[in-house]
Amino acid sequence: MAEPVIVALRAVHKSFNIGTPVETEVLHGIDLELRRGEFCAVMGPSGSGKSTLLNIIGLLDRPTSGTLSVCGEETTGLDDAALTRLRGHSIGFVFQYHHLLSAFSAIENVVLPMLGAAGRPDTAMFARAGRLLDEVGLSRWRDNPANRLSGGQQQRVAVARALAMNPPVLLADEPTGNLDTKSADAVFELLRKVNREDGTSVLFVTHNPELAARCDKTIQVVDGTIVGAREAAG
């Protein structure tokens, strides 16, 4: 039996500078489903709309038209506060640029999403952050400022931070793009481990065909349109 759909886009369009002479439509009627526990790569040339698509799924931007459901909740009519709550509890992000707070320690960076949700720190937050850093192999560096970690270590902290709220959906926008081959492979395998062990659904934007081939499915986006989807062999 197929797993339930956890993210669903129907006829999603996205335009910028609406009503001006430079109005541009970036996404043209996207239909996409991500099922629970699926690990899906998104590929396409630069400027094809991949990041815009991820921003819409991640509730960082709204579609111009069409519908988006996340974890069974239709988002079209939600106000900004409701979108923020849904995003905070349902979606984790890992970006190409890790966006850590450089003066904060690794564990403080991981605590931040939990602090944002609860409003004040407690020992349970730091205990969970410590466990997550242990899972990503960074226990020894938990108290190091982020700016004293290597690029691969910083990206692993970013993965731990994305998992802080135990989200059912993880969005990764070229998270290995700035890493050497060894570090990129380690970050990919970490995301794969989370996917397999916790059932987290992962949407992974990449330009690397070797990494895409290790995903369950690859979606090709060209000029704001999905032009094909390929299931992994075997």
Image (tube, helix red, strand yellow):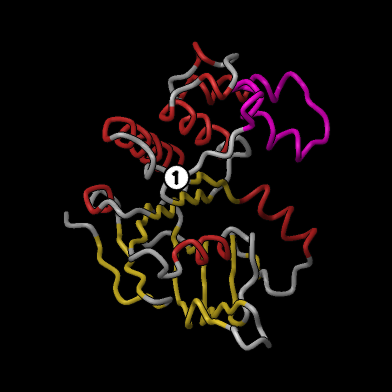
**Which residue is under mark 1?**
199
Q: Quadrant of the N terminus?
A: bottom left
Q: Is residue 213 left or right of residue 37?
A: left
Looking at the image, the residue that sits furthest to the right is 119
Residue 73 appears at what percent x and percent y?
65, 65
Q: Main secondary structure of the magenta part?
A: helix
> Which residue is drawn at the image coordinates 49% and 11% (left, top)?
140
Q: Nearer the viewer, residue 196 or 41?
A: 41
In the picture, the quarter occupied by the C terminus is bottom left
Q: Residues within 10 Å of mark 1 (few under 14, many from 20)?
A: some
Residue 116 occupies quadrant? top right
- Where's residue 26, x and y in %? 50, 77
Q: Residue at x 49, y 21 (%)?
A: 149
- Label 1 element class: loop
The region drawn magenta spans: 101-127
Residue 58 part of the magenta segment: no
* Callout 1 amino acid: Gly
Whether residue 200 is visible, yes or no, is: yes
- The residue at 55%/37% (across/down) is 163
Q: Is residue 201 visible?
A: no
